[in-house]
Amino acid sequence: MTADERGRVGVRRRGWFEVRWRQFRNAPRPVVRAVLSPLVVAIVLGLGYLAYDVALTRGASLPGGDLRALAVACFVVLVVTTGALITYLIVPQPTGAGGRRTRTLWSAALGLFAAVPIAYLVLVVESQLLRPLLT
């Protein structure tokens, strides 16, 4: 802290990393919920896809043959829709003067926009990091 001519104490300027770390530690609850709900869904469904992928790689004969492309498409659609739906249900809009909690499509949009990159990142982590360990 530095003092100016009048004897007031100035505020110390924080560095870029310190500001980002503080933002990460104090994230708003709706954002945390919007990220965690599709993340949990993506991890659970991703582990199912990983088991299917490893079984096909090891030569297991499954009914329907090799449907990995369809499984990935279903995975993304399920993560995005359930992430948007769960976020719509658990993230209410801020209360106004009336104090009544409302849910609008903005809650679902928050979950949708959080779910798209999460679905992709979970697939990348499972296919590039976990799959080589299991095959």
Image (cartoon, grey):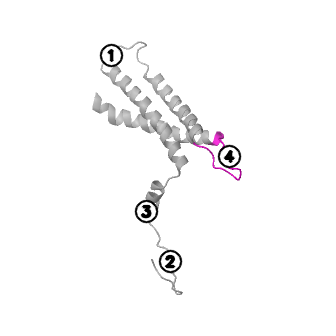
- Mark 3 highlights which residue? 18
Question: Considering the numbered disc 4 on the image, is that residue within a helix, a strand or a loop?
Answer: loop
Badge number at residue 10:
2
Quick one: quadrant of the N terminus? bottom left
Which image quarter: residue 122? top left
Q: Is residue 80 left or right of residue 60?
A: right
Residue 56 higher or lower than 41, as above or below? above
User: Label 2 near label 3: C-beta < 8 Å?
Assistant: no
Q: Alpha-carbon distance for marks 3 and 2?
A: 18 Å
Question: Considering the numbered disc 1 on the image, is that residue within a helix, a strand or a loop?
Answer: loop
Closer to viewer: mark 4 or mark 1: 4
Which residue appears farthest toward the front when viewing the image? 99
Lower position in the chain sequence, tag 3 or tag 1? 3
Lower position in the chain sequence, tag 1 or tag 2? 2
Circle 4: residue type? Arg
Q: Alpha-carbon distance for marks 2 and 4?
A: 41 Å
Residue in front for this viewpoint, 38 or 90: 90
Which residue range is magenta in the image? 91-106
User: Label 1 near label 4: C-beta < 8 Å?
Assistant: no
Was residue 56 drawn as part of the magenta stretch in this picture?
no
Circle 2: residue type? Gly
Question: Considering the numbered disc 2 on the image, is that residue within a helix, a strand or a loop?
Answer: loop
Q: Alpha-carbon distance for marks 4 and 1?
A: 55 Å
Was residue 103 drawn as part of the magenta stretch in this picture?
yes
Q: Residue at x 64, y 42 (%)?
A: 106
Q: Is residue 74 left or right of residue 103?
A: left
Q: Alpha-carbon distance for marks 1 and 2?
A: 68 Å
Badge number at residue 100:
4
- Mark 1 highlights which residue? 60
Which image quarter: residue 134? top left
